[in-house]
């Protein structure tokens, strides 16, 4: 069987990571028909649009995409292509495993956490009101009547944080279904419901309702600030985490840090109809074109994609080949070398080639 996969080549270090990943996936023997698509700063500079018209249609047609990172300008500039893709395709699950591999520098061992981040609600919907604009003033006037006891100043920017019952229910259900399917013991809901009673409070209430349908899985809830401390102190007591969008974004980077950094943290954005697999890390633009960054996170995202496509044998074998190369520590990028030995690191392409060689030696 040939799998149609849209390969979004991204910008910054994206194109070199996409090329290395494509080469490794082709070397697994699984047959792919790659449909390449550009998005991000490079295509923006050529056409004035970071999100070409064909992008959504192509993903809708082929259903599965593997995506290299894409830059989002900070402050001004165009809105995030990543967020737009997740919203327009309703990719409501952001699944981010944080797993220890021997040979990766980290203070922790044997971690195997899975994060379910809600991907379409919360402040990421992008409904914002800029300070000083007439529509912001109108909203402030309304808030002064609904909240007469609050002193609401005039010079504020406002972000809207919608948390819906429906979207919470489906992400928490996805976390529990995953726990059941993969023999996990516990789901932890992370929130700030003590302060945000109508948004995080709703998230927690719905999570508690869903938990009742899964009596075989332990359920608990932890406030997000405490969760950050707990994860640093005793991450081994956690298993599956489910979080609203913003906390999910932040806590999943924290978890990536626990297992050795962004270079080894994969992810998937999954909806009812479409899926996009991508690393947690961004476009690391300072290393653009230097054949320097670690391809592991995007390769492990490729492993997740292979599992999604039903190519379980190739997925297991590729994960083992990646783990082997990391453990051997010979043909790895700078971030996987012990401190002081970064000079003996290899580049993105060479690490990918070593993984292909390890894959081919495996039975
Ligand atoms: P980043 O993840 O791109 O890089 C932060 C640092 O992490 C890098 O400077 C580098 O030291 C390290 N790093 C990242 N990836 C690595 C890899 N594969 N191998 C080795 N080291 C690696 O984060 P940033 O600098 O905050 O973001 C850069 C751009 O990427 C921003 O525009 C941001 O919006 C965007 N971004 C995109 C995505 C995405 O496409 N899904 C995700 C996060 C950030």
Image (cartoon, rainbow, N blue to C red):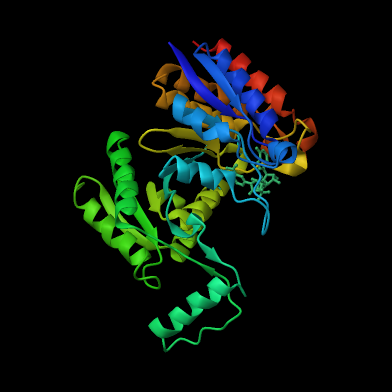
The quadrant holding residue 190 is bottom left
In-image side of 29 versus 193 (left or right): right
Q: Residue at x 39, y 62 (%)?
A: 191
Q: Residue at x 74, y 33 (%)?
A: 292
In-image side of 206 versus 347 (left or right): left
The number of discs equals 0
Query: Residue 230's spot in the image, x, y percent?
Result: 45, 59
Query: Residue 143's spot in the image, x, y percent?
Result: 44, 79
Q: Residue at x 54, y 48 (%)?
A: 258
Q: Quadrant of the N terminus?
A: top left
- Say which of 355 and 305 sits in front: 305
In-image side of 1 versus 332 (left or right): left
- Say which of 37 and 268 sits in front: 37
Q: Residue at x 76, y 43 (%)?
A: 286
Query: Residue 102's spot in the image, x, y percent?
Result: 56, 34
Query: Residue 234's spot in the image, x, y percent?
Result: 45, 55
Picture layout, residue 291 above or below residue 76: above
Q: Is residue 202 visible?
A: yes
- Say which of 302 and 347 sits in front: 302
Picture layout, residue 14 above or below residue 320: below
Q: Is residue 106 visible?
A: no
């Amino acid at each position: 069987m040939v799998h149609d996969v849209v390969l979004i080549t991204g910008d910054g270090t994206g194109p070199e990571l996409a090329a290395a990943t494509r080469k490794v996936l082709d070397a697994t023997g699984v047959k792919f028909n790659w449909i390449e698509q550009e998005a991000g700063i490079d295509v923006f500079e050529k056409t004035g649009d970071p999100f070409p018209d064909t992008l959504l249609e192509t993903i809708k047609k082929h259903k599965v995409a593997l995506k290299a990172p894409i830059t989002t300008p900070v402050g001004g500039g165009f809105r995030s292509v990543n967020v737009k893709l997740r919203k327009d395709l309703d990719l409501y699950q952001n699944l981010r495993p944080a797993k220890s591999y021997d040979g990766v520098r980290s203070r922790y061992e044997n971690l195997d956490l899975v994060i379910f981040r809600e991907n379409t609600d919360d402040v990421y919907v992008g409904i914002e009101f800029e300070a000083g604009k007439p529509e912001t003033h109108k909203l402030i006037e309304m808030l002064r009547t609904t909240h007469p006891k609050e002193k609401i100043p005039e010079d504020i920017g406002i972000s809207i944080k919608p948390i819906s019952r429906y979207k919470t229910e489906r992400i928490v259900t996805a976390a529990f279904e995953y726990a059941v399917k993969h023999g996990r013991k516990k789901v932890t809901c992370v929130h700030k419901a003590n302060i945000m009673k109508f948004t995080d409070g709703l998230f927690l209430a719905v999570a508690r309702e869903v938990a009742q349908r899964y009596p075989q899985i332990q359920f608990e809830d932890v406030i997000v600030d405490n969760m950050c401390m707990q994860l640093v102190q005793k991450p081994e007591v956690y298993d599956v985490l489910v979080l609203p969008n913003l906390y999910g974004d932040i806590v999943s980077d924290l978890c990536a840090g626990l297992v050795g950094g962004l270079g080894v943290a994969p992810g998937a954005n999954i909806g009812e109809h479409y899926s996009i697999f991508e690393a947690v890390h961004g476009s690391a633009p300072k290393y653009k074109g230097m054949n320097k960054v670690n391809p592991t996170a995007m390769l492990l995202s490729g492993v997740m994609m292979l599992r999604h496509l039903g190519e379980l044998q190739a997925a297991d074998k590729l994960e083992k080949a990646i783990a082997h190369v990391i453990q051997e520590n010979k043909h790895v990028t700078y971030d996987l070398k012990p401190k002081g030995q970064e000079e003996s690191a290899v580049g993105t392409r060479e690490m990918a080639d070593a993984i292909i060689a390890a894959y081919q030696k495996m039975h």
